[in-house]
Image (cartoon, rainbow, N blue to C red):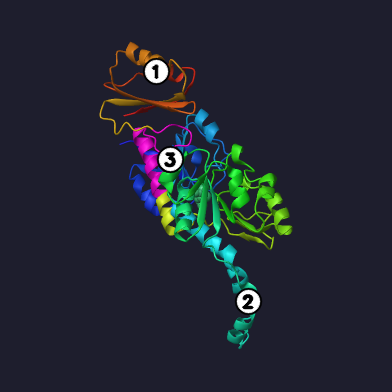
Amino acid sequence: MTTFRYAMLNNIAQDGLERLGENFVEVKDAHEAEGILVRSAKMHDMDFSDNLLAVARAGAGVNNIPVKDLAEKGIVVFNTPGANSNAVKELVIAVLILASRNIIDGINWVRAHMDNPDIAAQVEKEKKQFAGTEIKGKKLGVIGLGAIGAKVSKAAVSLGMDVFGFDPFIDAEKALKINKKMNYLTDLDEIYRNCDYITIHVPAMESTKGYIDADAVREMKDGVVILNMARDVLIDENAVLEALDAGKVRYYVSDFPNATVAGHKNCITIPHLGASTEEAEKNCAVMACNELKDYLENGNITNSVNFPNVDAGKCIYDTRVLILHKNIPGMIKKLSHIIGDEGINVAEMTNRSRNGYAVTILDLDSGISEESRETLASIEGVYKIRVIK
Ligand code: MLT
């Protein structure tokens, strides 16, 4: 059985690591590893050795990973969509209520008065200053209806909120399947103009930086609460601070404290706890390790953010050749010629493509020579060849 080396850039829950099995060995130096497991370590300035075949992130966001550069080196990047969505949903509901009920100020007041023997009587006199509002009947705008946004929309409906969902990547039919009690909007401005609470759940990418910008904030209803459990770069936080100071935005709740927002009295900042539950950490670790194992052992790809999904099962033939390549015309013909010229029979072929990237798996009745392997690797547009026995 082939042994694979993996490195962990962050702690990964043991339940996940156990999935890897005995043929996986941990190494401390990532340059020696075929697989990297990561949570939030920043990988943009790392250099990657030729040993590396895959990076698996135990989490949904991949903004800490140079996904495109790795694709061009033939390194598959995985994430774990949905594995921590319940944890994030629960935190969104918690902060919706925190931002409505003055609970934090109330708790701080109690702490400041804890030595007062008459605190019980004092509480009844003072508590009016902490009176809040209820979320029932209020309008919640959910931007992004992926695993987290979908769960948030359902939970909010069940708490009596009037939920408005927006996601440019889905249509009305899909939105209905996500939550038939949600109002699906195709115009984001309607969310900005009408909602009392706005929560964002889109991935952080070059194209989504500053998604909620100064114009969006200007458009919003007075007294709006903005919730950001996704990533700080999605919001023009300086515009939000101005709006907080002007009294237009009531609260900005963020899971990403930074120098801009951490000290502001109407920012509720949480130390990136969205996915920090025992359950979510375990779910993410299990999913990430399963993905890494299946790719390293069998070449199958599930939940990659840079290559298409492909599942050819376990190899039941002599040899499996996996080719990661550009999705360009003529590639399959070139690959088949080289294999055919060596007189090898292709027992099965699987090819998948997505967004300019493709994967071809050739299951062969006999092994290929080093020369053919090199010829395959030299085809223009081929990123990586793997031979799996
Ligand atoms: C995510 O992107 O899913 C979370 O940020 C995960 C984490 O907290 O590591």
- Horizontal placement of 57 versus 107: left or right? left
Numbered disc 3: secondary structure: helix
The residue labelled by disc 3 is 173
Disc marking residue 128 = 2
CB atoms at circles 2 and 3 under 8 Å apart? Answer: no
- The disc, 2 or 1, on the residue closer to the chain's N-terminal end is 2
To which quarter of the image does residue 266 belong? Answer: bottom right
373 up-or-down from 65: above or below = above
Identify which amino acid the numbered label 2 is placed on: Lys
Q: Nearer the viewer, mark 2 or mark 3?
A: 3
| Place of residue 222 in the rendered image (x, y in percent of width and height, measured from the top left) | 67, 56
Identify which amino acid the numbered label 3 is placed on: Glu
Residue displayed at 33% across by 13% down: 340
Q: Quadrant of the C terminus?
A: top left
Crowding at dot 1, Cα within 10 Å, few <14 / some 14-19 / many 20+, comes out as: few
Taking the view exactly as shown, the residue that stands out farthest to the bottom is 117
- The disc, 2 or 3, on the residue closer to the chain's N-terminal end is 2
Q: Nearer the viewer, residue 99 or 268?
A: 99
Residue displayed at 47% across by 18% down: 378
92 up-or-down from 214: above or below = below
Q: Nearer the viewer, residue 285 or 23?
A: 285
The residue labelled by disc 1 is 332
To which quarter of the image does residue 54 belong? Answer: top left
Q: Which residues are magenta?
A: 285-309
- Horizontal placement of 215 versus 36: left or right? right
Cα–Cα span, label 2 and label 3: 46 Å
State whether residue 160 appears in this view. yes
Identify which amino acid the numbered label 1 is placed on: Ile
